[in-house]
Image (spheres, rainbow, N blue to C red):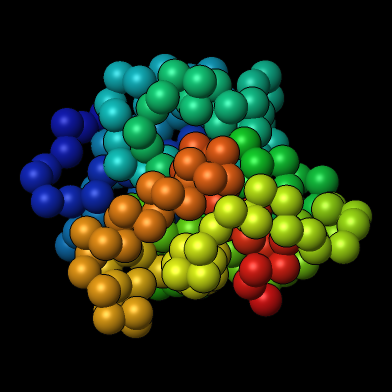
């Protein structure tokens, strides 16, 4: 199906998967959602990068294993291009050797292809809202990959409040939700998040959440 420009107020989605039947199934479900619109498709990583640069979608649903440029390499290249799209990995691969590299490459979330459709729509909305999807099994994989006990590392310069905000980031909460829980203004939370990213020397919330999991700041 041809690419579409998208309609105002909807979450604009790009589907990147080498199986047409998967793309068709995702499109069929997502297009009945009032707030989600599929604006394009791609069959491999190279095409996905080109479509992402052309269409500038809000969220990309990306498979891991594809011919040519795979999902992890596509993630790295999109990050190098400073493409603003949030990437949600949708794959059948559950092994640690694929989960960890995908998250480290910049994925905002990692779900499996057998996910309930309603849960997938919720995951898309969460990722679009700036949240990080770290499911329990993904956190376990990250901790196993670390291979060493939690340590303070660069987190030693974080204030108590910043560590508290970081815990909520790792739990997948948005700035608005953190502000509500901690009884702070959203502007104050944004300032804390900026300080956390600077002190940990990471580029986004996903990397901050990974750091928190690896260093025992969140369970």
Q: Nearer the viewer, residue 92 or 89?
A: 89
Residue 162 in the image: x percent, y percent? 47, 63
In which quadrant of the rendered view does residue 70 lie? Answer: top right
Question: Relative to 8, does residue 193 appear above or below in the rendering?
Answer: below
In which quadrant of the rendered view does residue 144 lie? Answer: bottom right
Mark count: 0
* 111 on left or right of 13: right
Can residue 72 be seen at all in this image of the molecule? yes
* 197 on left or right of 201: left
Question: Relative to 6, does residue 49 appear above or below in the rendering?
Answer: above
* 190 on left or right of 61: left
Dividing the image into 4 quarters, which one contains the C terminus?
bottom right
Residue at image position (67%, 19%) is 68
Residue 57 in the image: x percent, y percent? 30, 36
Residue at image position (42%, 49%) is 195
Residue 19 in the image: x percent, y percent? 57, 38
Residue at image position (22%, 59%) is 187
Farthest-out residue, left = 8
Q: Nearer the viewer, residue 182 or 160?
A: 160
């Amino acid at each position: 199906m041809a690419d579409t420009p998208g309609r105002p107020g909807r979450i604009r989605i790009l589907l990147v998967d080498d199986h047409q039947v998967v793309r068709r199934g995702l499109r069929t479900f997502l297009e009945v959602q009032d707030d989600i619109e599929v604006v394009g498709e791609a069959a491999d990583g190279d095409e996905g990068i080109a479509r992402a640069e052309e269409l500038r979608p809000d969220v990309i649903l990306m498979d891991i294993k594809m011919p040519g440029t795979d999902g992890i390499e596509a993630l790295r290249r999109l990050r190098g291009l400073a493409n603003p799209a949030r990437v949600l990995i949708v794959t059948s691969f559950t092994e640690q050797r694929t989960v960890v590299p995908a998250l480290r490459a910049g994925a905002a979330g990692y779900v499996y292809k057998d996910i309930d459709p309603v849960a997938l729509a919720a995951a898309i909305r969460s990722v679009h809202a700036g949240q990080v999807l770290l499911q329990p099994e993904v956190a376990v994989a990250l901790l196993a990959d670390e291979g060493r006990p939690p340590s303070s590392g660069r987190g030693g310069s974080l204030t108590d409040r910043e560590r508290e905000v970081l815990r909520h980031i790792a739990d997948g909460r948005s700035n608005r939700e953190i502000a509500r829980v901690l009884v702070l203004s959203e502007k104050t939370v944004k300032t804390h998040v900026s300080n956390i990213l600077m002190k940990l020397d990471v580029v986004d919330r996903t990397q901050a959440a990974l750091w928190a999991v690896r260093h025992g700041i969140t369970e």
